[in-house]
Image (tube, rainbow, N blue to C red):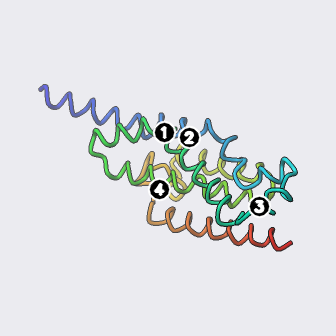
Amino acid sequence: MQPESFLSRKQLASTTTRELVLPFAWIWPILIWSAIGNREIHNNVQQLTFSSASPLMRQLPAQWVAGFIVTLIMASGAALRFAIDGDTVGLLALFSAAFFIPSLALASGVWSGTSKLFEILYMVIWYLGPLNKVPGLDFIGSHSNGYPQFFIPFSIALIAFAIFGRARQLRN
């Protein structure tokens, strides 16, 4: 009887981490992510920022990496839980979502010039997907595998879209 109860506790811990801990851990830094890609416009320093050496290939990736690090730090407990449990599907979903969130923030910030677009989009996707079990929007993998086959290529497209948008801003 001992191994079965241990297994059920392990499954309960993993399920709780996927369905409750990770979604709520990834709502707290929304204000940090929402500034990615638009901080220089919000603070009216775009002329200084865009005139520096290689703003497209240095500053934009630095902003995305900072957002990625924040995302991973907020999910570090869940990543540890998945690693201990040997949950490779959970780890893949976690890294896919960690790749997606700053990519969405970067593209939204560059193209809108404000933090509001990302805040609204992220809250809607977060509420419908991980919390309300809408399958295609569950990027965290709280009730599914997280759809990394969609969110990783989509994140790469969002990054390319942000680079194109920033290059357009630099030309103007």
Mark in the foreground, 3 or 1? 3
Amino acid bearing label 3: Ser
Q: Position of residue 19 (x, y in %)?
A: 45, 39
Q: Position of residue 142 (x, y in %)?
A: 45, 45
Kindly identify which residue carries mark 3: 52
Dots 4, 3 in contact, CB < 8 A: no
Amino acid bearing label 4: Ser
Secondary structure, mark 4, is helix
Task: Using the rendered view, name the quadrant where residue 6 is placed.
Answer: top left
Kindly identify which residue carries mark 2: 26
State the separation of the CA atoms marked 4 and 1.
13 Å
Dots 3, 1 in contact, CB < 8 A: no
Kindly identify which residue carries mark 1: 22
Secondary structure, mark 1, is helix
| 105 w.r.t. 7: above or below | below
Nearer-N-terminus badge (4/3): 3
At 56% from the left edge and 40% from the top edge, which residue is drawn? 26
State the separation of the CA atoms marked 3 and 1.
38 Å
In the rendered image, the quadrant that contains the N terminus is: top left
Nearer-N-terminus badge (4/1): 1
In the rendered image, the quadrant that contains the C terminus is: bottom right
At 66% from the left edge and 54% from the top edge, which residue is drawn? 105
Q: Is residue 33 left or right of residue 99?
A: right
Amino acid bearing label 1: Leu
50 and 81: which one is in front? 50
Task: Using the rendered view, name the quadrant where residue 11 is placed.
Answer: top left
Kindly identify which residue carries mark 4: 96
State the separation of the CA atoms marked 3 and 2.
33 Å
Dots 1, 2 in contact, CB < 8 A: yes
Q: Residues within 10 Å of mark 3 (few under 14, many from 20)?
A: few
